[in-house]
Image (cartoon, rainbow, N blue to C red):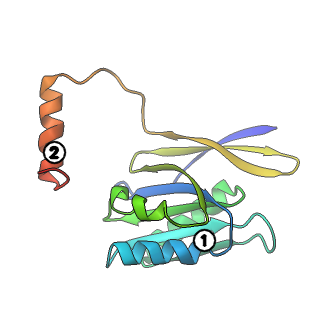
Amino acid sequence: MELESIKVKKDEEMNVILGQSHFIKTVEDIYESLVTNVPDIKFGVAFCEASGDRLVRYDGTDERCKELAVENARDINAGHFFIIVLDGTYPINVLPRLKEVQEICRIYCATANPLEVIVVENGSGRGILGVIDGSPTIGVEAEEDKEWRNSFLRDIGYKR
């Protein structure tokens, strides 16, 4: 077995959702889920088939997001996984609906942080073992950090 760490490519302000699915219909159902949940959403989705034609299937509403989704899918190249690149939308706005998509088995992460995907390869194929999402913590929040967090969530409209 060989392990590899693959850096996900994205623009700094973009978010990424990485998951595992099981069927060719994944791209269409993710597309439908995203555009019905967030009108005018800018995204690209790519899905790696693990059987049949074994193609990278893709779609989206934004050319840059689609290009990045396909490039990352080709780099990671693990069976039956998908990657969504979002521009101008937070994952929290779409994750509940994505979790309802019948073919989605698992969501590995949803992040704007620097992201690396740990892939294993053996004689029969490639698979995702996990992800490295951002940097390690450096402490525990103090009262002023809690106040900032509460204020920030209200400023961006997630709390009242």
What residue is disc 2 on? Answer: 152
What residue is disc 1 on? Answer: 26
Q: Indicate which disc, 1 or 2, sits on the residue closer to the N terminus.
A: 1
Place residue 149 in its image quadrant: top left
Identify whether 36 is placed above or below 118.
Answer: below
Instruction: Give, as a three-letter code, the residue at label 1.
Output: Thr
Residue 126 in the image: x percent, y percent? Answer: 76, 51
Residue at x 28%, y 21% (from the top left corner):
140
- Viewer-closest of 85 and 80: 80
Q: In the structure shown, which secondary structural element does the residue marked by tag 2 occupy?
A: helix
Q: In screen coordinates, is 35 left or right of 120?
A: left
Q: In the structure shown, which secondary structural element does the residue marked by tag 1 occupy?
A: helix
Identify whether 92 is placed above or below 36.
Answer: above
Place residue 95 in its image quadrant: bottom left
Residue at x 51%, y 65% (from the top left corner):
68
Foreground label between 1 and 2: 1
